[in-house]
Image (tube, rainbow, N blue to C red):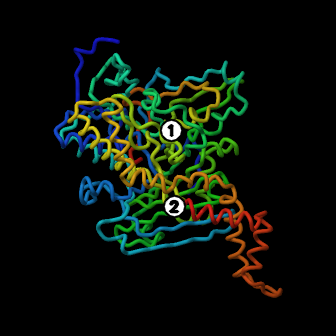
Amino acid sequence: MNKMSVSERLGVNKYELDEGHPHIEVHEDICRVKCKDLACLFVCPANVYSEQNGHIVADWAGCLECGTCKVACPSDALDWFYPRGGFGVVYRSG
Amino acid sequence: MTDHTSVDKFDVIVVGAGVAGSTAAYLLARQGLQVVLIERGPYPGSKNLSGGVLYTHSLHQILPNFWEEAPVERCITNQVVIFMTGSAHFNIDYKDEAFSKAPYNAFTVLRGKFDRWLAEQAEAAGAILVPRIRVDRVLRGHQGEVIGIAAGEEEMLADVVIAADGANSFLAQEAGLRGRIPTHQVGVGVKELIALPRETIEERFRLDGREGAAYAIVGYATQGVAGGGFLYTNLDTISAGLVMRLDDLVQNKLKPGDVIEDFLSQPMIAGLVKGGKLVEYGAHLVPEGGLAMMPRLVADGILVVGDAAGLGVNNGFVIRGMDLAIGSAAAAAEAILEARARNDFSTGGLGDYAQKLEKSFVLADMRTYARTPEFFSNDRLYHAYPAMLTDLMRQIYTHHAVPREHLVSMFSRSARENGVSLFDLVRDLFSGVRSL
């Protein structure tokens, strides 16, 4: 198997995108003060979180809904809840 | 408190149509109760992901010979444990034909198909399945007891709510049954589903017909992070993945998405998935804290089952969750029927659930493996021991122009080189024997 990037891998998945309704919110004011590790930037299997122009951005559309980021966030700076009913990742095989 | 008199009332609301939720819904609907089974995905299974091995015993008790009807993939006959370093691997390979005869021991399943089928059984028994509904919170009565659920503008009432909403269980947290999940009590599971022709899978894994293989891989699979890898054969796909303990992953600052690709490119693994096509990439939290992470199981009007109750056993050879989830659902259903006969759905009235679980294999097994998570937090399992094993094998098979040593002196030298003392060895061996 050829190596694939995470975004290429997410590309084979099925999603019902809930446009305009992000299910993740990053409270940067908390991160900046309380968080040293910024674990969200690496623990997410879908690489949802990245740092862009000094801001932590959540590209929530590719979220696999595992909840890893929420458990790993030491400062409760993530508002992370499931997408609205029927939306988000749709595992065909699972 | 709001007035809920105009709202629909059911006997039981089950939140989450995974294996625990659908089993509970099936058992209760079969007894004539009005059961609503709520699923946030477009269909049951669409949010669920597991490595994929279902040990059959608990579901077989409820739906005898379910494998004749259910969409199962392969029955597991080949069990392999691999100790892997970056350049070598050492296998324990066990094949047993007893496993290929009914009642089968274990099957691989794909949850998108299997959970859908199980929810259909609940529906056929009379449960009402409501997909595409995300439950936001529980509703409480005057005494603080749980009396139903709210989803957006909708409210539903019931005598009992079953929280079968998975590893993250927001409902159990909200009902005050458990607090925040600590990072050392969960593993991050990542999985790639890789398609290959059926015959190729059967050749590479030495399978006959519907036989299947389950590989557990320790050591370099996770680049030394506490946890392990797995490879399971389905009919025409392979489930390949890793489970890594979250605290250790954070400490090592590794990205699961990279670690899994590296795992798949290890020669031992690459040869098995060669030429395959990725058809799905998923991730899921795995309850790994064992007995220590189990929440309170019951509060007034609510009880918690399956992953939401932290039920999981990982002893290095096998990773179990679904059979425990089904066992817990059966105990919950029985307790609810008894509570109903007494018309008492308070903590006391539902309290038999904990006792039934205690008497069943579910808590017995959780107790047997109560020390296992601690054993597996030992760093030597992921670095020193796989290295020592492969060192030893290398020396056994390597011959050059120096005199041979006895096995025991090879072994003690390898232990020394890997920083393992005799005391460590004895202690770890003792701990392993006690906890596995």
Which image quarter holds the C terminus of chain B? bottom right
Work out which residue is located at the far left of the displayed protein and give it: B32
Q: Secondary structure at mark 2?
A: loop
- Label 2 to label 1: alpha-carbon separation: 28 Å
Identified at 47% across, 63% down, the residue is B214
| Residue A79 seen in render | yes
Identified at 33% across, 18% down, the residue is B141
Identified at 54% across, 46% down, the residue is B289
The mark tally for this picture is: 2
In screen coordinates, is B6 left or right of B223?
left
In screen coordinates, is A63 left or right of B26?
right
Q: Indicate the amino acid at tag 2.
A: Gly
Residue B40 coordinates in the image, percent (x, y): 37, 32
Q: Quadrant of residue B350?
A: top left
Q: The residue marked by circle 1 belongs to what chain?
A: A
Determine which residue is flagged by label 1: A66
Residue B164 coordinates in the image, percent (x, y): 37, 38
Q: Indicate the amino acid at tag 1.
A: Cys
| Residue B189 seen in render | no
Q: Secondary structure at mark 1?
A: loop
Height in image: B259 above or below B267? above
Q: Looking at the picture, tell me which residue is in the foreground, A20 or B217.
A: B217
Q: What mark, if any, has residue B275 been given in the picture?
A: 2
Q: For mark 1, does the 10 Å Cα neighbourhood hold few (<14), some (14 to 19), or many (20 or more) residues?
A: many
